[in-house]
């Protein structure tokens, strides 16, 4: 966090569960919640990165997050991780469904197995994480669920139809759960990132030409980084946004 970042008293000591928290946007989210004094548990398939993040934050004087390695395509493993983390951290009243993988692919070569795999990685686990954690929120009488969508299908991006289909589904999932869980005091929102300069994006797809084209399309002429998403997530989790639900919140510098 930066010195000018907001502090949310309603997030202190809140139990937060984050998926895909070991790197990129997810790691920034974990770090920002820890800086708020939240009790954070996070899962990721990357064991070494996850453990290193938890140790780094503890070494910086933050509440040490609980890291559990988990392959989110294994729903039984996800359910077990939620149960283990809840027993250790207390009932979760914040869930951030961040995990995803934006592999590019040619529609002509997509197999049934690949298609189903992309839905598992980018959509299915969000539903089952909500299913596992919502009862904790219902018991608490409050909660904030933040799902991650994608700007890609809003821009009619090509080259990854299984991914964009899954991410479009996240918005439907969000609005449906907002209606079902609203009577219990639980808010459900969806964050839509623009092109975020994670290490993975920079290694695989950022070129001077692509960067220039993105900046030209944005209203604000600056690059987006993981903390830009984390700050939006904090606000949606905090009581400051207590009457905000069933909506998408786009962080793309005005590109879409």
Image: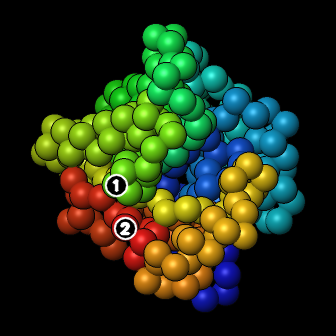
Q: Residue at x 72, y 63 (%)?
A: 207
Q: Where is residue 172 in the image (x, y as percent from the top left)?
A: 24, 40
Q: Position of residue 67 (x, y in %)?
A: 70, 38
The front one of 188 and 214 is 214
Q: Name the residue under label 2.
A: 256
Residue 98's place in the image compared with 34, above or below, is above
Residues at badges 1 and 2 in contact (C-beta under 8 Å)?
yes
Residue 125's place in the image compared with 203, above or below, is above
**Quadrant of the rendering where the N terminus is positioned:** bottom right
Q: Mark 1 points at which residue?
A: 154
SS under mark 1: loop
Q: Where is residue 23 in the image (x, y as percent from the top left)?
A: 71, 49
The front one of 70 and 193 is 193
Q: Which residue is drawn at 47% across and 27% down?
A: 107
Determine which quarter of the picture holds residue 62. Answer: bottom right
Residue density around tag 2, few if under 14, some if 14–19, many if 20 or more, within 10 Å: some
Measure how far apart labels 1 and 2 are at the Cα level.
7 Å
């Amino acid at each position: 966090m930066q010195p000018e970042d907001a502090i949310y008293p309603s997030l202190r000591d809140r139990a937060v569960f984050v998926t895909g928290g070991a790197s990129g946007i997810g790691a920034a989210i974990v770090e920002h919640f820890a800086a708020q004094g939240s009790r954070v548990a996070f899962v990721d398939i990357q064991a070494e990165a996850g453990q290193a993040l938890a140790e780094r934050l503890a070494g910086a004087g933050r509440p040490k997050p609980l890291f559990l390695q988990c392959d989110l395509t294994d729903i039984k493993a996800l359910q077990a991780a939620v149960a283990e983390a809840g027993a250790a951290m207390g009932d979760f009243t914040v869930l951030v469904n961040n995990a995803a993988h934006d592999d590019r692919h040619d529609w002509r070569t997509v197999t049934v197995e690949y298609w189903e795999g992309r839905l598992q990685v980018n959509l299915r686990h969000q539903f089952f994480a909500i299913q596992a954690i919502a009862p904790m929120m219902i018991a608490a009488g409050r909660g904030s669920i933040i799902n991650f969508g994608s700007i890609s299908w809003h821009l009619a991006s090509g080259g990854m139809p299984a991914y964009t289909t899954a991410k479009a589904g996240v918005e439907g999932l969000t609005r449906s759960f907002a209606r079902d869980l609203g009577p219990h005091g639980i808010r459900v929102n969806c964050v839509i990132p623009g092109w975020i300069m994670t290490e993975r994006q920079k290694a695989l797809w950022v070129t001077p030409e692509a960067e220039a084209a993105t900046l030209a399309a944005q209203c604000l002429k600056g690059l987006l980084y993981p903390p830009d998403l984390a700050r939006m997530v904090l606000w949606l989790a905090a009581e400051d946004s207590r009457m905000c639900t069933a909506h998408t919140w786009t962080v793309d510098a005005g590109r879409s």
